[in-house]
Image (cartoon, rainbow, N blue to C red):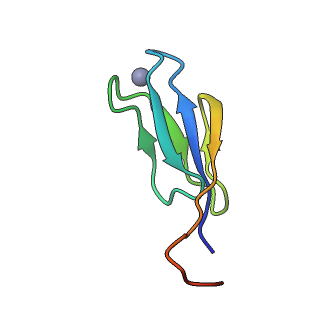
Amino acid sequence: MAGNFYKVACSDCENEQIVFGKASSVVNCAVCGTTLATPTGGNAEFHGEVVETVERRDTDGLEA
Ligand SMILES: [Zn+2]
């Protein structure tokens, strides 16, 4: 089962970045380096505003 991705807006520079919902390591803003998400063991904790949820679906013909 694929996890969801989230588009998180950086609170410092307004960069929007796609972050995996179950990120296993700290995710930093690619522009200014501010921490956007930290792993918690389940869903990551986001430090910016989540502006969009990106649901990932496998459409390659394999039925789950
Ligand atoms: Zn930033």
Indicate the quadrant of ligand 1 in the picture. Answer: top left
Point out the residue furthest to the left here.
31
> Measured from the top left, where is residue 11 in percent x and y?
54, 19
Q: Is residue 21 above or below residue 58?
A: above
Indicate left or right for 11 with 40 as reference: left
Identity of the residue drawn at 40% across and 32% down:
29
Front residue (pair 2, 60)? 60
Point out the residue furthest to the bottom here.
63
> Measured from the top left, where is residue 21 in percent x and y?
60, 53
Front residue (pair 64, 11)? 64
Q: Is residue 45 above or below residue 13?
A: below
Front residue (pair 45, 4)? 4
Q: Which quarter of the image is occupied by the N terminus?
A: bottom right
> Measured from the top left, where is residue 18 in percent x and y?
48, 41
Q: Is residue 57 above or below residue 21?
A: below
> Measured from the top left, where is residue 51 in percent x and y?
64, 29
Front residue (pair 41, 1)? 1
Identity of the residue drawn at 56% across and 84% down:
62
Identity of the residue drawn at 67% across and 62% down:
42
